[in-house]
Image (cartoon, rainbow, N blue to C red):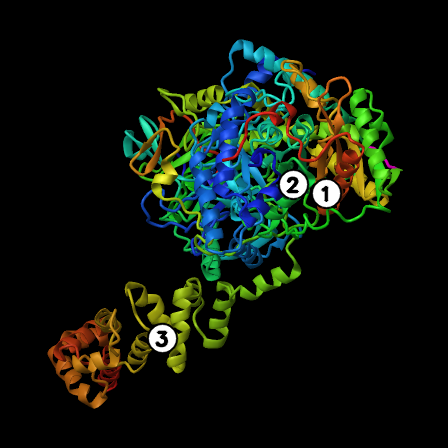
Amino acid sequence: MERLDLLSAWQIRAGIEAGDFSATEVAQASLATIREREPRIQAFLQVCDDLALKAAAATDARRAAGQKLGSLAGVPVAFKDNMHLVGSRTTCASKMLENYESPFTATCVRRMLDAGATPVGKTNMDEFAFGSSTESSAFFPTHNPWDANRVPGGSSGGSAAAVAAGEVAIALGSDTGGSIRQPAAFCGVVGLKPTYGSVSRYGVVAFGSSLDQVGPFGRSVADVALAMDALVAGGRDRLDSTSQNVDVGFANCLEDPVEGMRVGVIPSLMEHKGLSAEIKEGLEAARKALKGQGVRIVEVGLPNMDSAIAAYYAIGPCEAFSNLARFDGVRFGYQEPSCETLAQQTAFSRAHGFGAEAKRRQLLGAYLLASGVYDKYYYPAQQVRTLITSDYAAAFKRCDALLLPAAPTTAWQFGHMSDPTQMYASDLFTISNNIAGNGGVCVPAGLGSSSGMPVAVQLQGPPFEDKKLLQVARAVERGIAHAGLFEPNTVAPSFVERGGDGA
Amino acid sequence: MPLSKEDVRTIAEYARIVLTEQELDEMTTYMNDAVRMLQPLREYDLAGVEPTFHPIGNLSNVMTDDKVDANGRALHIDEALKNAASTRDRAFRVPSILGEEGGDR
Amino acid sequence: MKKLNEVLRDWDVTIGLEVHTALTTLQTKMFCDCKLSHDDPPNTNVCPVCLGMPGALPVPNKKAIESIVMAGLATNCQIMPRSYFYRKHYFYPDMSKNYQTTQGPVAFCMHGHLDLEVPGQGANGGYVTPIRIQRIHMEEDAAKMVHVGGQEGRIGGSSESLLDYNRCGTPLIELVTEPDIRTPEEARLFMEKLRQVFLALGISDCSMEKGSMRCDGNVSIRRRGTTQLGTKTEMKNLNSFKSLHDALAYEICRQAEVLEAGGAVLQETRHWEPSKRRTVVMRTKETADDYRMYPDPDLAPFDLSEEFVQACRARVPELPDAKRDRYMAELGIKRKDADQIAGSPAAALLFEEAATMAPECAGLVANVMVNLAPAATAITAAQVAGLAELLRDDAITFAQAREVLQIVDGTDADPREVVDKRGMRQITDADALATTVDEVLQRCPSQVAQYKEGSRKVVGFLVGQCMKASRGTGNPKLFNKLLVQRLDEMNRG
């Protein structure tokens, strides 16, 4: 019997269609793998055996009835715990929502289920997605499958780790400032932040409404493309005013040649002083991989990128303060017991329901939105956003995609990054396209020569050209594999040797 | 001028988050560090630059039809109340309001 | 305290109104597709969006946007080429997200006006004054809170409060006037006029009683001849035309008393207590509230196309002023009657239909509409026309018309048939009545003598005697005419 935990989503889908194994067998294998590996990884906040087996049984019944199977039929999928799924809690890894039962299902989750995916559980994250290491989860940290002493990145650390550890083939995350791409990079998987508006935000607990975007993790570009097709298949979501139509077809164009395309690099970023040598090696390997396939590397500039962090840490906290104001313990969420007045109940519920980072971001936002302060930071940040967006537009006149680092270093060790503002600065390479809204993807580019941890590169594309972006990402993946640096569909090595057998 | 502990206390009161004295000290340090990070925004000459509040290109005028429960979202009373810590009959319950009042509506 | 008239001699008054109108005629809420509740049990019409559940997102109701654009067009506003929804934050559980979705510095409609006609009183002539409208913006209503354990549902002394989110998210338009209103009477007239316009547009039931139209007022006074604006107070709970007028009148007098005693008016919010006929302090505003407004990132901007605005314009019906003018010009209706009928869409509709049926007596149709129809619950145009014709023919008296109306109200009976069947039709044959007139004159020699001495009042008494003698079947107007004829003949003769 094949090792189901090592199969790609494509292989699972094809195997079920061919009758090599059933969706139920795949679900059981995924659940068994989770049981076996979770003590070391802690990627999941909830495992939903019932939902998984029910969905798998439905897929098997469809097949038995000769009905057409969805594009993700029987593929085990995990969802970041800020996504609503009826039958599960949606906790955002916060004490505030510890017992919150999803009253509805998020559109992104619904679309994965509509494509036949098997929902196996909800993954750990930084509380309300505030963080880059998943350490701010109110419940427990998640460990990097490549080295349990290291963080998986964040905020979608649980989703990245679950995919890297072979617990699921695909997971969804959300990316507000790099929260899909940085954990993907840290865990050696592919993670895409699509263009803002491509994937509905309806049912995803908001952090920064103008920055948040849902996207998939997979162990290959092809699996990520398969998930994207499922996410956009229903057209724009009428429940999300900011969502837009995106045509399906992500999976179709991956193998199209990239010869003649131009990929831009920003010299100042490639030589950024904070970049580790390993990361620079990874970038060089990706550059070679692309050149080897006939891509022209051109130099471009994003002159306002240095201000992206400042713009982001003005806009993000303001939106976060506003979005989290609803957590007052009245309609849902933690309620401080035995309060005599409403004022006490509200202020203590919020004091004891939120963790430290959630409080920091909200207070910063409440300050920045105050009258007299608004004009100093928030408003200029939105003007700088205009400049950054035009920088991108100018750059994309000269190239089809940008190649840049994903993060300054590989995954760091627990406790290494204790100062909040220092952690903010590590988002340098990912946040600018949350500000501009265009897509970005991280692809593994080998293992670090000194850390042994996965090294990734990031590609960014023009808005709503994420298909081409994945095509370039696939070219990097192909070239990196060709150079013997990293194979697609790699499961973290400590798990490859044992466990995870299917039936 | 850096934010004082008292400034931060006022902000916390506004944001309805009770902080201990120690948390207030830490928060004051954090807030000043964070605001320092934002200084590049103040060094720009942004005269004539339009803000981008929504990174959605030219998307505008998004509206929906006036049709009851077209999306099947209405919640049954049990569903509506199930996540509330305190209810009475069909209503959400809050303790005495004492001197507070709503906004300017 | 001095009387308002006295105060107005020494002080100039500045009043601005904020009028909230719930778009009750829509099917659904502002940002979700929950049914608009009227009398449903608590929390019947709620969904993740209006309960402010995490992850829920708003999508604006197109018809609500059309409604506010129509309101703007009907009040001579500019429809702004680009505007945003904003979030306005305050922590209070009646707003499920702890922010209200409203609009920022630019509203859908701005810079409008309504011309107010203030009728004359006694020696004072009437005048027309424009009241400028600063803006009309779109927002959402709050949930209903019931305070348990306190007195009469008030907050003070209550032990707990219960929240019903049925109303939360109801589309609300807020109209803000410039401070152009100078008397409580103007304020009342403005509110009446606005209500008539909104009723004509059909965007709300405009019930002040049910709270679908609510009004707050800002008022300040300054000594005549000075230019320095006084400190203003904000009045809440002006929820009837009478409350609006009386609260403003009270507050103007109160401010004058404070200032005349050398005191200072404080910037505060005051609550009108109709039963005690006074305003009391709700809270003192030392600093302006900081609502941390910013553009709502969940809602795309609006840049309404000329096409969209034109489509709304096409749906704006003839407004009350234009209707009134048309009734006067085309049908010769008295201004006062025309004004009253045109102010109510239902009355106007009924009137126009009835006037078509009885085109030669439109004035009487209007008379029936103004003086009789308001007492009826369900009267048809044919019945109105029938009553008007009966009156035109002097077949019944006005008092009888009222009686007939009561009989036909709620049925489809023809008033003419009712009159005939019940033998109510008055005798309008002069020969038939002449006998009665002669009899009465014979019986009343002293009244005849009085008439001769110049007293015209006695005619009324004699008409009454004739009516009595004919057991109400004679036409009083005709009796009057015949009596005067006879008396004059007797005098001459």
Q: Disc 1 to disc 3, how far (Cα)? A: 80 Å
Q: Residue at x 75, y 33 (%)?
A: A458
**Label 3 residue SS:** helix
Indicate the quadrant where residue A41 lies: top right
> How many numbered discs, if any?
3
Q: Which residue corresponds to mark 1?
A: A470
| Amino acid type indicated by mark 2 | Val
Q: Disc 3 to disc 2, how far (Cα)? A: 79 Å
Instruction: Choose between C230 and A268: the one closer to the eye.
Output: A268
Residue A95, how many percent across, how many down?
Answer: 47, 23
The numbered mark, 2 or 1, whose residue comes first in the sequence reads 2
Q: Residue at x 81, y 33 (%)?
A: A483
CA neighbours of label 1 inside 10 A, class few (<14), some (14 to 19), many (20+): many
Q: Which residue corresponds to mark 3?
A: C364
Q: Disc 2 to disc 1, how far (Cα)? A: 9 Å
Q: Is residue A134 above or below residue C431?
A: above
Marked residue chain, label 2? A
| Amino acid type indicated by mark 3 | Leu
Indicate the quadrant where residue A89 lies: top left
Residue C195, how many percent across, how many down?
Answer: 45, 55
Q: Is residue C431 above or below residue A65?
A: below
Q: Is residue A348 left or right of residue C86?
A: left
CA neighbours of label 2 inside 10 A, class few (<14), some (14 to 19), many (20+): many
Q: Is residue C417 above or below residue A268?
A: below
The magenta segment is A299-303
Q: Which residue corresponds to mark 2?
A: A224
Front position among marks 3 and 2: 2
Q: Is residue A80 above or below residue A400?
A: above
Residue C215, how many percent across, how many down?
Answer: 45, 44
